[in-house]
Amino acid sequence: MGGIDYPQKIKPKHAEYPVVGIDAASSEFYCRPEVFAPSFRRLKYVQRNTVLDYMYGRIDAQLGRTYHAGEDFYDIVDGLRAIDECINFMNFGEGDRIGHGIALGVNASTYYEERDFRIILPKQDMLDNAVWMHKMMEFYSIPDEYGLKANLRKVFRELFYEIYSDVFNSKNELESTSISDYYDSWQLRGDDPATILGKEETFKPYMLGDHDELKIIRKISKIRNLFRAYHYSGSAKKKGAECKEFHLHEGYDKVVEQLQKKLRERIQKKHISIETNPTSNMQITDVDRYAEHPITVLNNSYLKAKPDSMIDVSINTDDQGVFATSLEKEFTLMALALEKEKDRDGNPLYSTVDIYRWLDSIRESACFHSFL
């Protein structure tokens, strides 16, 4: 997605409010990033001038932004897609934070083996996942060793007919809609629906951007019809909400692993930090061991001889009262868990020195990315 250049006149005057950042943590199942996107893009350009700024030398700093993504998901893929939507639709970059991000580091092979390579999710989510996954395989040049792309196109065609067959007046338009057309309509979901459909006067902060690709897409009637149907068709929403079991194609988990890696690389390049919550994730996600928490995948500096991921991460408590924990306890539990890890020969997997260097680097990263 391209950048957004807002005119100076829409920027608000400074006000001394004790607010340094904003955090959205709604259920991902019923509230995708697209819902918050216009507001979050708008807030990126709100300059803060709080009573605390004089202490830290950050007069006129922007509001900090955190969005929780990749924690609740039917499938790892829609968890990854939520993170991608967060980055694209909210114009996330350096200084922004993603909460949890479990989908980026959970072990894909174990995840799908435990489910016998079957998943149950709403048809609309599976349709979106298939289209997004197909496009990301092309975008990142991921080899199609198992013929997965053909399977994804088949899933797209079947679900698209099931969900949207009653929406189009023209059968020809329905049949001619390609997976690329659907992806283009997905790209516009960060726009305010009322704005793109001409129901309100265009207001820049509520549009994703003005770069050429989006300008062209917005003018294509087929894309606009898809966009309208996704947001306003009662029939499509009802059919899309129906749950169905899907048997995953061979190699699905291998491609997911590649997508996880590519998205981690993208986040690292953009200097987006991730707030991790070990105890919380142990209780409400698929993570069942502290030593296997995705934080060790998101940032494995000091834990590997040749680190392949050094995303800025922090260790947090989530809801301290609910999970009966503290920041000190979270660091202690991670340290103890890693100290107990053994290799195949029964020797310590990590040295104590490396573990504490790793934890100290996380502490430093958290301080650096603090909104204060």
Image (cartoon, helix red, strand yellow):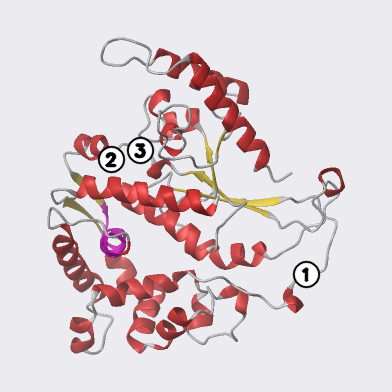
Q: Secondary structure at mark 2?
A: helix
Give the CA separation, mark 2 to mark 3. Answer: 6 Å
Task: Name the residue at 37% across, 75% down.
Answer: 185
**Compared to 242, does 56 lie above or below?**
above
- Specify the segment rendered in magenta: 121-138
Provide the residue designation for mark 1.
12
**Compared to 137, does 177 lie above or below?**
below
Q: Secondary structure at mark 1?
A: loop
Provide the residue designation for mark 3.
106
Query: Which is more toward the observer, 343 or 243?
Result: 343
The residue type indicated by label 2 comes to Ala
Q: Tell me which label, 1 or 2, sits earlier in the chain.
A: 1
Provide the residue designation for mark 2.
108
The residue type indicated by label 1 comes to Pro
Q: Secondary structure at mark 3?
A: loop
Task: Name the residue at 18% across, 63% down.
Answer: 155
In the visual, does 306 lie left or right of 171? right
Task: Name the residue at 76% across, 51% down.
Answer: 19
User: How dense is the environment of label 2, judged by Cα within 10 Å: few (below 14), some, or many (20 and up)?
Assistant: many
In the visual, does 172 lie left or right of 131? left
Residue 174 percent across, percent down from the top left: 22, 82
User: How dense is the environment of label 1, judged by Cα within 10 Å: few (below 14), some, or many (20 and up)?
Assistant: few
Note whether residue 143 is visible.
yes
In the visual, does 105 lie left or right of 254? right
Q: Contact, CB < 8 Å: mark 2 with mark 3?
A: yes
